Amino acid sequence: MALILGSGSPRRLDLLSQLGVVPDDVRPPEIDETPARDELPRPYCVRMAREKAQAVQAGADDIVLCADTTVAMGRRILGKPADAGEAAHFLHALSGRRHRVVTAVVVRRGERLWERAVISQVRFKRLSEAEVNAYLRTGDWKGKAGGYAIQGLAGAFIPWISGSFTGIVGLPLAETANLLQAAGYPLYGDAP
């Protein structure tokens, strides 16, 4: 039995290491991440994680772990910004407001799937133009849903959260541990 992480995210690798887990292999799948017309954030996020898990090549007894994180403002999905202009647009939209961060985790072993979506609330302080521009110059927004990373410099913009900090980063650890154990992965000294 091998554990395969279906993600190229260094943050997810770091989070897994907090559980004492080192994947046997890392295989980020290539899938189309375009939201369907009128697709809502939570179903979109769950669909993405599920499609990623199903796209990873693995043996029948291997365990595949995939996740997807989506920033949601109401019914609107804020994905990974294409450029600094879109990142600025996202940051201005988030400024002074609450939004949701949805992270869906899917574990696959053979044909069986275990999945969980974790929703957290995040509040941004009101951002000045200088703060937005300084953040954009760091490049920390690149490849991040909603154009920010709570574990990076944008953490200074967030005075309040409700939910899972690790879920906001990209892999809710409590839920991930439960899913891995349900699939038979030995954690915390469990016998294989």
Image: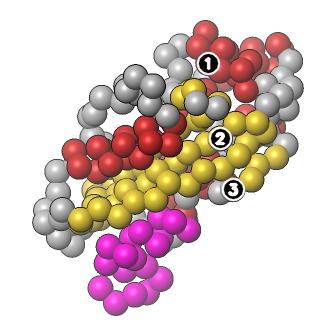
Q: In which quarter of the image is the C terminus?
A: bottom left
* Label drawn at residue 87: 1
Question: What's the amino acid at mark 2?
Answer: Arg
Q: What element carries label 3?
A: loop
Q: In which quarter of the image is the N terminus?
A: bottom left
> In the image as oriented, which residue stretches furthest toward the left?
60
Query: In the shown orientation, is residue 169 left or right of residue 63?
Result: right
| For discs 1 and 2, the disc positioned in front in the rendered view | 2
Query: Label 3 amino acid?
Result: Gly
Q: Pointer 1 and pointer 2: residues touching (CB < 8 Å)?
A: no
Residue 9 in which image quadrant: top left
Residues drawn in magenta: 174-192
Disc on res. 172: none
Residue 47 magenta: no
Residue 184 in the magenta stretch? The answer is yes
Relative vertical location of residue 6 with respect to residue 78 in this rendering, above or below = below
Query: Label 3 belongs to which residue?
Result: 163
SS for callout 1? helix
Which residue lies at the image location 40% right of the left edge and 60% below the top edge? 115
The x, y position of residue 121, in whole percent, is: 71, 46
Q: Which of marks 2 and 3 is nearer the N terminus?
A: 2
